[in-house]
Structures are given as C-alpha cells and as structure tokens.
Image (tube, rainbow, N blue to C red):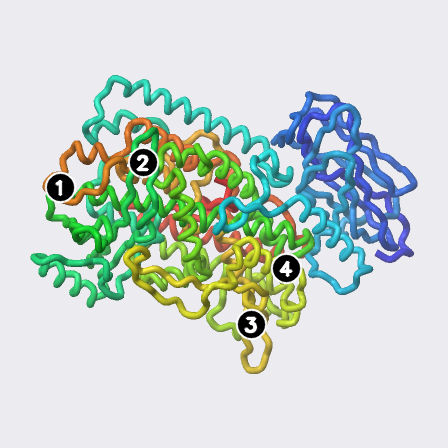
Amino acid sequence: MPGSRPTPRCALTPASLTSAGTPKGGRQEFAPPCLGPGSNAVETRRRGPAGVLPPEASAAPQPAFPRCQPREAETPSPTLPPHFPKEEEFERDVPKDLGPLQFVKLRKHHSLVDDAWFCDCITVRGPGACEEATFFPCYRWVQGQDVLSLPEGTARLAGDNALDVFQKHREKELKERRRLYCWATWKEGLPRTIAAERQDDLPPNSRFHEEKRLDFEWALKAGALETVLKRVYTLLSSWSRLEDFDQIFWGQKSDLAERVHHCWRDDELFGYQFLNGANPMVLRRSASLPSRLVLPSGTEALGAQLERELQSGSLFEADFSLLDGIPANVIRGEKQYLAAPLVMLQMRPEGKLLPVVIQIQPPSPSCPAPPLFLPSDPPLAWLLAKIWVRNSDFQLHQLQYHLLNTHLVAEVIAVATMRCLPGLHPVFKLLIPHIRYTLEINTRARSQLISEGGIFDKAVSTGGGGHVHLLRRAMAQLTYSSLCPPDDLAARGLLGIPSALYAHDALRLWEIIARVWKELGNVPQDNAGETCPHKQYVQGIVRLFYHRDDVVRGDPELQAWCREITEVGLCQAQDRARGPEKTRTTAREGRARVPLGLPCSPRGYFPTCDTNGVSLPPSSPRVSSVISLRCASSLALPSTGPSTRARYDSRQPGSPKLDWYAWVPNAPCTMRMPPPTTKEDVKMATVMGSLPDIRQACLQMTITWHLGRRQPDMVPLGHHKEKYFSSPKAKAVLSQFQTDLENLEREITARNAQVDLPYDYLRPSRIENSVTI
C-alpha cells in the first residue's frame, strides 16, 4: 500500500493460539514489525481454552507487543502440556501504520508457571474490505522466553543474497532445527532414525497432542485389561480344537473379521488375500517356474497343469524366501518356528485366485526334498500348509512392508525434511502435513513394540532378534521402483486384472497424487498462456516453483535434502546397483530383485524432458509423490477407516489388521511346532500345537485392535486443517486435489456396491494423511 495513504485503524486479532496448559498469570505478546513503508491493518486469530478472554485494545505508539492477558486456570502438565480442543477467537485494534509486513514476532511472557501455547497462525488484514489478508503460518508450540519470528506464508526458494532478511531467517531456522532433530542409528544396516530413546526426548512440535496421547495410552490399558479378562475366561477351558479360539474372539471386531472367522479355511478366501488382503505386496505373475519348486516323481500331472497355466498367463506365485534362515524366537523357554513357503496359484476365468500347490520350505542339500502340499491332500494337512503361509505373510507384512517401507522410510524423510528444508521452502510446505505424529509413533514402536522384551519378543516368531535380521535383508532389497505403485505393480504383472482391487485403487490414487502426464509436451495452459497447475496435486505444486532445469540444480536446500535422505538416512542408498531390475535365484533368497539405487542428487530425483526444443518443467513430482505416499499412510498398508469417534463402530468397515488378523488362525503371529514333513501325520493336535497358545493369541488380538482401530483425531488424506501455502494458485491445487479425491471416493463406493467383498482400504476418506499408528 502506498505510503501516502492515511494511517488506518488496524484490527489485530491475536494469533490462533491454543492453550497447551492452563496459564496462571502469564501473557502472550505479538509483535507485528513494520519492515517496509505503507500501512496495513492487522488481523490475527487466536484459539485458546475456556477461560481465556481477549484483552482490551492497546494503542501503544511503538510496534512492540499488543498484550493478551489470559485468566488464571489450572496448573499445566509438567512435561508437554495438553492440546485442548476448546478454542476461542478474539480481535484487537491497533491504530498503527504497520506497512507491508514480512515477519511477525510472537513470544509469551512467563509469570508463575512455565506454560505453553500452541499457535496456529496470525492473519493481518488491510484497512479496506477489499484488501487481501497477509497470512503468517505457525503451527508450533510457544513456550519459554524465546521469540518466534514468523515469515509471511508465501513459499520461496533460497536466494543468493546473504543479506536478504528471508535468507537470514532460513539459515537461522535450519541451524536450530539441526540442533533439535539429530540422527541416530537404531540397528546397523537399517535406516537411521531420530535421536530419541523415548517420546519425551522428541522436540515438542513432533509430539502427540494431548487428545492423541490420552487415547493411545487409554487404548493400551483397555487392551491389557481385555487380555486379562480373556485369560481368566479361558483359565479352565480346553484348548484342543480350532473352535476354542471362539472363546477369545469377542470384543471390538468388524463385519469382515466375522466373515474371515467363518470362511478362513476356504481356498477362495486364502487366494483373495494375496490380491486384496492386508498384504497385497508379495503376489506376482509367474514368468517361469521357480527353480526351488522341485516336482517329485508321480506329480507329472501337476507339472503339466503348471505349464499350461504358465503359458496362458494365469499362473501366479507368492514366494517367502526372504524368511529362509531367519532365526526364530524363543518365548518363555519354548522354541518357535519359521518357514519360507512358496505358493503357486491359478487365476480362474471368473477372477478367483486359487492355490494349486504349497511348498513350505525351500530345498536344502542336507535334507530330503520338502513335500508339496496339494488341495487334494488330507484336509488338515492342506489346512496346516495354508496356515504356515499365512504366518509367513504376517511376518513380511509387519516387518518389510509396514515397518520398513512405511514407518522407517517415512521417518527418514521426516528427519531430513526438518533438517534441510526451512518453513518457507515449497517442498517443506507440501510435505509437512504428511509427517504429523510420525516421529513419536516410531519412537514408541522402538521402545515398546520391537524393543528387547517388547511385543515382538513376547508373541511373534521373528522376535528375539530375527526381526532385525529380516529387516536388514529387506533393506538390502529396497528399491526406488518398489515404492512407486505403477512400477511395482507392472513388475509383478498385476496390471489389468479385474479382481485386483488393490492394484486398481492404488493406481487411481497415485494418478491423483502424482498425475505425471504421459505426454509431457501437452502442458495445459490458462487464458494468460501460463502453465495451469491445478490439474494435479504434487506436480501442480512443484511446477509453481521449478520452471527450468537450472532452478532445480540451483536449489541448495533441495540438494541437501536429497543427499540427507539417500546418503545419511538411507545409508548410502545411492551406491546401490542401478539400471533395469534383474532377478537372481538362490536357495535362500529365491527370486529376489537386485536393488535399484536411489539417486542422491536433485538431478536424479528430478529428471527433465525436452520436447521440440522447449525446456519443460521437471517431472520432479515423481519423487515427491513417492514421499507423499510413504508419509500419507503408504499404499503398502492402507490406513484405518475414517472416524472422529474414539470407540470402534462394528457396523463400519475395519482396518486391514482388524479385518484379517483378528481371527488368529488366519494370520498367526507365531508357530510353536516345526513345519510338517509328511502329510499323513497331521492331526488336530498338530494344528493346535502349531498355532499360538492362549497367551500369544490374546496378545495378538489386543495389539491388532490397538493398532487397527480408528483413531479419534484421524485426518483424511488431503484434508489437513493447516494452511501452509498462502498463494491462490497453491490453494487452487489443493482444492482440486480434494475434489479429485471425492470423485475417487464415489467411484470406489459405486464399485463396491457391485462386488461380493467390498475393498475399502484405499477409499480416500479412510487413508490417514500421515503415518500416525
């Protein structure tokens, strides 16, 4: 606004502040400094707990701090104060010529109690009704005596001028973040983690808010109580038949879990889970018969059938060779067992995937050839073979595809983002909503779930150290393309299968998030001839800032971020073999993929393309889409359903874990007897002696409910409340993204009405915006 205009009476609405504790006599101060000529009316919004009232307007002549005096209330938590859902808004008038603002300073005066407040944002409005508001995002805790300097919310790339006020702010912010967010090595050979042994060691801005913390800890206690009740209930009961698992199959469960309970022995449901169950990541179309599948004499008819299916393209396999040689757990002095099965499956014309043969263990030179189990075998022998497969699937799902590919990869991205990208960087603004709560849930997992003496050691056959060995093997095979659903599904031959609902929904979701055009030259333009960014989400945001190759190459913060991810967080991932994926076959690793190195520079992450001599915007959204998907509740393990209720409603669909793992025989966490070597000796006592005992089964059901239930503060994908971008174009991209997600929601809902077993896990309203559980 020109300086010649009269100074208006400015309205200051103190920033969106939520009381984190309940302050006693403290006050918060807001300093909107005048960093340029002219005049602006200021409006900020404040959220606070009940009992916090707006002060009287201050007309101090200096741009020092308009005061906000809260009422006296309860004593806050001595650690991280709670985040109350109660909010209040109020305004203040500041008759001061503030000029065009670049920064707003925010601090809290300490009085009797070192309370803390959570500030969402500050909004500054001009003097006229038509003046646009200036937005200052914060979304951080305000505590102690520090002064927060909040830059105006427009995203900016790093500048070359060291004297620029924004550049100085970026450097200072990153220096402080690097002090708070440090790397640590949890286990050698695995992705690095945040340096925090317990959740209390984390920076406050990465902690659970109070509602989340209370619910999480309440659920643990409720689950422990349920476990005790089930143990008491079964204290004098027999445990010799599969029906005896009904004694503990009560409490919170979904409709699909009930269906699994009744139909889990059926071959059709067994095969369906490889396509659309909790872990649709192992199945692949067979390109040749696996070398480990040794057909003994007398099975010529089976060999001929497999060859026919192979030639017709209807032969599929699920190979769990990654588990071969992993040391098994010892629980309460009792040895547990692991297997590395191979399943060959046939795709029927009607779309049903049915098992043809199961080999529980790979061949070994020192042992007789392992038996092959067939659907025509004695029912209990065939059932036990399928149970062994389900146990192996449980191990890979939980450790490789959920823990490693989702949680640990997301943590690397979260830490690198906090260390390398300042709040003004567009990629930071793009990704920060997708790393909410990730660091705390991972820290809790390392201290409670996969720690020494944790849940894995108490109930899972890969516990006691085997899980670390398995994670290292999976890490050695982690590829960039395996994190990209189009590449992964194509490599596994799962495209174009009508009954592969996961594959269909994953591709549609990827298309909406990434929207990488097949013809990069066909760039839509608006009426002014400028690139129109609102036809996709990640690509739309990134194209607003990276118009040419040299802009990508010249961004030092982006380069540092890429290097931090690959060289530090992923332990020199850029040094792995590159080029087309190849296969190698060994007795131990089976048909394993040669690792495809992750590029360490933005040039590798952001390939560019020239069409007709015109330099097009780089296709940088590809890597950002991978990151968004890893952080936004990875496609490898879809999130729990949408609900803001703390209690689980059994009438609504459940999560993959709650649906498929609640009935323990369908996905046993451990096996207590070695795999059978003959078919005729398998009796009911063999089956029950192999499955988890009462204690282990109760613990599996408790953890399944705790980690699979709906979260009370679940944020659906793309619907975060935080507003990090302030430009109209960036807001238009997010709005279009939300519209696309709503359209996909309707598509999936209509499709599900036509199928026997609805697939809901990738319905956008059920996908968490970040890895939070």
Label 4: which secondary element? helix
Identify residue type, mark 4: Ala
Q: Which residue is mark 2?
A: 255
Q: Which residue is mark 1?
A: 379
Vertical arrangement, residue 645 with respect to residue 560, above or below = above
Q: Given this view, does label 2 or label 4 mark the residue nearer the observer?
A: 4
Q: Given this view, does label 4 or label 1 mark the residue nearer the observer?
A: 4
Quick one: which residue is furthest to the front in this view?
Answer: 366
Identify residue type, mark 1: Pro
Residue beneath the point at 59% across and 70% down: 617
Where is residue 274 drawn, in percent x and y? 29, 50
The answer to whether residue 57 is left or right of residue 492 is: right
Identify residue type, mark 2: Asp
* Residue 31, quarter of picture: top right
Q: Which residue is mark 3?
A: 608
Identify residue type, mark 3: Thr
